[in-house]
Amino acid sequence: MKKILAIIMLVAITGCAFSQNSYQTFPSAGLKVICDCKLRSNSVFIEAANSQGINNIIAALICAENENDPETGVIVNINVYDESASFNKFKTTLHEYLKKKLLEKYASNLAQAGFSYEYITFQGETALEYTFDQYGVPTKALMFYKNQKSYLLQVASRSSFITKYNLLKNSFKLI
């Protein structure tokens, strides 16, 4: 009985350590990231997008911490889209120009929605970083294009959301 209890405790401790201190890797999405909760496929989002004709989703990942406490709860989203259909319409020499125009359109949509944003450099690419309230919950997000894919990283929380966002952003790696 003591051995079983020790194994259960070791598994629980290891599981917590994994989700909080080490990379979660998603080979099919080509990324790895450190996140305080275990990311999983957001099948509800994927199904809703597919029903609207959006079929270029490579990955839609989601996780939540403290989901039963609205004051300390955290929601993390990472979406990856295959944008090759758009890029393949243009010569390779025009891809940088296309990325610029796509980001400008995204920024225009953010401005129309009243979101504050700024252009930053992320993963060697120009990116948009923006903040907004999602149903009254402060949210920070990052959107960029790389290797004919678009990436969206987003963290929503009423508690330490900048710290959580920075952990996600600073640990995000393409593989």
Image (spheres, rainbow, N blue to C red):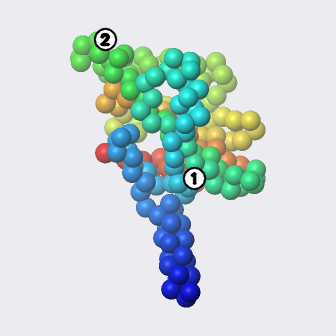
Check disc 2 and give the amino acid type. Lys
Task: Tell me which residue sits at (67%, 24%) in the image.
Answer: 114
Q: Classify mark 1: helix, strand or loop.
A: helix
What residue is shown with label 2?
89
- Image quarter of the C terminus: top left
Residue 93 versus residue 170 in the image, above or below: above
**Mark 2 Cα shell of 10 Å, populated few (<14), some (14-19), many (≥20):** few
- Where on the picture, by quarter, is residue 148? top left
What residue is shown with label 1?
164
List the single residue furthest toward the top.
89
* The one of 34 and 127 positioned closer to us in this rendering: 34
* Residue 11 percent location from the top left of the image: 50, 72
Label 1 vs label 2: CA separation? 38 Å
Residue 124 horizontal side relative to residue 158, left or right: left
**Mark 1 Cα shell of 10 Å, populated few (<14), some (14-19), many (≥20):** many
Task: Tell me which residue sits at (53%, 66%) in the image.
Answer: 16
Task: Tell me which residue sits at (45%, 36%) in the image.
Answer: 59
Residue 164 versus residue 5 in the image, above or below: above
- Image quarter of the N terminus: bottom right
Check disc 1 and give the amino acid type. Lys
Kindly report which numbered mark, 1 or 2, lies closer to the viewer in this rendering: 2
Residue 9 visible in the displayed image: yes
- Total residue callouts: 2
Q: Classify mark 2: helix, strand or loop.
A: loop
Task: Tell me which residue sits at (41%, 32%) in the image.
Answer: 58
* Residue 144 percent location from the top left of the image: 43, 31
- Where on the picture, by quarter, is residue 155? top right
Residue 134 horizontal side relative to residue 22, left or right: right
